[in-house]
Image (tube, rainbow, N blue to C red):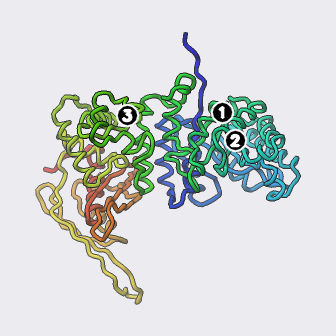
Amino acid sequence: MSMTKERIYLFDTTLRDGAQTSGVNFSVEDKIRIAEALDRLGVDYVEGGWPGANPTDTAFFENPPTLTRATFTAFGMTKRPGRSAANDPGLAAVLGAATPAVCLVGKTWDFHVDHALEIERDENVTLIAESVQATRERGAEAMFDAEHFFDGYKANPDFALQCLDAALQAGARWVVLCDTNGGTLPHEIEEIVTAATAVVPPENLGIHTHNDTGNAVANTLAAVRAGARQVQGTMNGLGERCGNADLTAVIPSLMLKPGFAERFEVGIDRDGLGHLTQVSRLMDELLNQAPDRHAPYVGASAFAHKGGLHVSAVMKDPTTYEHIPPETVGNQRTVLVSDQAGRSNILARLAEAGIEVDPKDRRIERLLTEVKEREFAGYSYDGAEASFELMARRALGQVPVYFDVSSFRVMVERRHNALGELVTVSEATVKLAIDSREVMSVAEGNGPVNALDNAIRKDFGRYAGYLADLRLVDYKVRILDGGTEAVTRVLVESADGAGERWFTVGVSPNIVDASFQALMDSIVYKLYRDGAPASA
């Protein structure tokens, strides 16, 4: 007898909560890239940030990403005391973003109402209701984040529940219980969420946990058991202090684990779940940080086995030391004989790039070997799909030769200009062979990479038209090993007039050489994608 599963909705707050992580600073381009990746993954809501709070968020909401599955959501506060909803500039900025959904945070702890807002408790209840009502009148799906709800409930349960009821009665689609300081434990979460369901039905109840006790994922799952049907969190557990609930652990736990998998369903299908590791590592590449090797489900060591009895047991029966098959979440087993896992990942990546190939093609083995060698040298293709596609197509003999680089040279000079100002000038010289002729170009730029880019494109013969709308959007450098002789990885994001964007990667002990590799891949990818003919 089949049983209808209850739906759990996934609300990703990476672009706001994640931006509060120490050392994290998203650019507008980063936000677009992340939002699109989350949309492809299959989350239900992508919270973009707080319109009007800072220039980055304002620019992001002025040119929002195109999402096909997820509901784009703006975040803000309930209206200020003493103002009407129509005359509150902060609320107006959030509602003015014209997103399909709006999530407003408000006080539910009487201590904050008494000592921070310094207003009557009834007025706090009213401002929650009026803010939610204004959101509904604007035509947006309204959500209310009940700030410090668990502390508020412990102090004054009647008032905390009254705040929830005000939001629900005003038309909130979701009322979300927030463990704002991350201090609540799973048994408390389950007890208090159960109490909240007396006021807010499960189909309207959400959970938002922080990880200050290391229990954010456990607290989220406990809340689902108690009745919450929306879960909020971030990719890789990003967030201020100790972070938020890590969706890379929450999602597979809901989809795969007994007690959840047979009872609940999420908007991510098994194919989407197979991309979870890739999305996790894409996040790290965009943030220019090393992935957490020991992260559950998606870490490089999550399914790593180091010799001896473990490896022997795993090879006979993987379930001995693996709680799920690693490929379920797009990860792979790491043992001495891991070629088959690697092979399946390569085939999946080829399919994503639209490259049709016979799985038995011997060239796949050579490509797999090359990928392993390059990743050992420091390359990472999780955030550089264009470079991976080029490498794969080259291995399959599909990329024409457009030009050859004979040599390049970059000089950086610090000098006084004609006005007597101390300036730093970069000059690049590049020698190319195009259509059986050698071209030497010299150009200056505001840095070595910009000078190289200018020099390369200064005289590109018949390919100049193909590259006219190519521009470099972002440039990230990561030092893989410490010291002055460290290996450097460069990630370059490029775009063109058609609105297409792609990432390429270069690795070298020399930062300029690494940059040049990434730049060359970007140019070749553009020529290949636009169907440029091979060099004569």
Give the left or right position of residue 527, taking residue 226 as reference.
left
In front of the other: 291 or 488: 291
Q: Is residue 444 above or below residue 147?
A: below
User: Between tags 2 and 3, which lies in front?
Assistant: 3
- Residue 167: give x, y in percent of width and height: 77, 39
Looking at this rendering, what residue extends furthest in the front direction? 309
| Dot 2 and dot 3 residues touching (CB under 8 Å) | no
Q: What residue appears at the point 20 percent right and 40 percent down from the top-left corner? A: 398
Q: Counting residues from the N terminus, which is met first, the one under dot 2 or under dot 3?
A: 2
Q: Amino acid at mark 2?
A: Leu
Measure the alpha-carbon separation of dots 1 and 3.
Answer: 32 Å
Secondary element type, mark 2: strand
Mark 2 and mark 1 in contact? Answer it, CB < 8 Å: yes
Per the image, label 1 sits on a secondary structure element best described as: loop
Give the mark, 1 or 3, whose residue is nearer the N terminus.
Answer: 1
Q: Amino acid at mark 3?
A: Tyr
- In the rendered image, which quarter contains the N terminus? top right
What residue is shown with label 3?
321
* Local crowd size for mark 2, using a 10 Å CA cut-off: few (<14), some (14–19), many (≥20): many
Q: Does residue 456 appear in this view?
A: no
- Rendered image quadrant of residue 407: bottom left
Disc 1 residue type (three-letter): Ala
The dot on residue 228 is 1
Residue 286 pos. (x, y %): 43, 53
Cα separation between marks 2 and 3: 36 Å
Residue 177 badge: 2
Vertical placement of residue 15 versus 457, above or below: above
Q: Secondary structure at mark 3?
A: loop
Question: Dot 1, crowdedness within 10 Å: few (<14), some or many (≥20)?
Answer: many
Tell which of 166 and 56 is nearer to you.
166
